[in-house]
Amino acid sequence: MDYTDDLGKLKIIKNGVETECDILFTFTCEELGKNYIGYTDGTISKNGRKNIYVNSYDPILGFKQLEDVKTKAEMDMIQDVLKQIDQDEGGI
């Protein structure tokens, strides 16, 4: 599974407010047949690390229509990818 980083910015609407987020990485999971994007709004969690959000997306539509992670299999796979990126990069 390959991932790409340093992709720029993403604008999302949270609670009716437009928020600019930094895109951290994208990756494709061939097993599930989906593409994913990881991004942050720059906020910090209680454990002192960046809040990172991951959604699936359709590569034809781009990042304009993000989909929520819907299954435990997806969530488990995403956790594995985040751990791998954290190890490769020395922390996201």
Image (cartoon, rainbow, N blue to C red):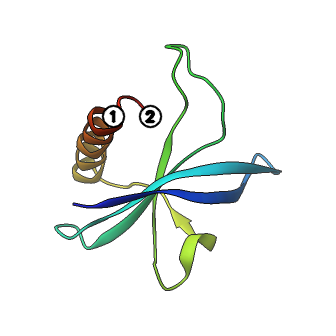
Q: Image point 32% across, 70% down: which residue?
A: 34
Mark 2, residues whose alpha carbon is within 10 Å: few (<14), some, or many (≥20)?
A: some
- The N terminus lies in quadrant: bottom left
Q: Does 32 sit left or right of 20 as displayed? A: left
Residue 33 lies in quadrant: bottom left
Q: Is residue 59 above or below residue 82?
A: below
Which residue is the site of mark 2?
92
- Given the current orientation, which residue lies at the most extreme left position? 31
The amino acid sitting under disc 1 is Asp
Q: Image point 45% across, 54% down: which residue?
A: 25
Q: Is residue 81 above or below residue 2?
A: above
Residue 86 badge? 1
Which element carries disc 1, helix, strand or loop? helix
Residue 11 horizontal/vertical position (percent): 72, 58
Q: Nearer the viewer, residue 3 or 82?
A: 3
Residue 63 lies in quadrant: bottom right
Q: Image point 54% across, 65% down: which residue?
A: 66
Mark 1, residues whose alpha carbon is within 10 Å: few (<14), some, or many (≥20)?
A: few
Which element carries disc 2, helix, strand or loop? loop
Residue 72 horizontal/vertical position (percent): 26, 47
- Given the current orientation, which residue lies at the most extreme top position? 47
Q: Nearer the viewer, residue 14 or 82?
A: 82
Q: Nearer the viewer, residue 79 or 92?
A: 92
- Given the current orientation, which residue lies at the most extreme right position? 17
Mark 2 and mark 1 residues within 8 Å of each other at the beta carbon: yes
- The C terminus lies in quadrant: top left
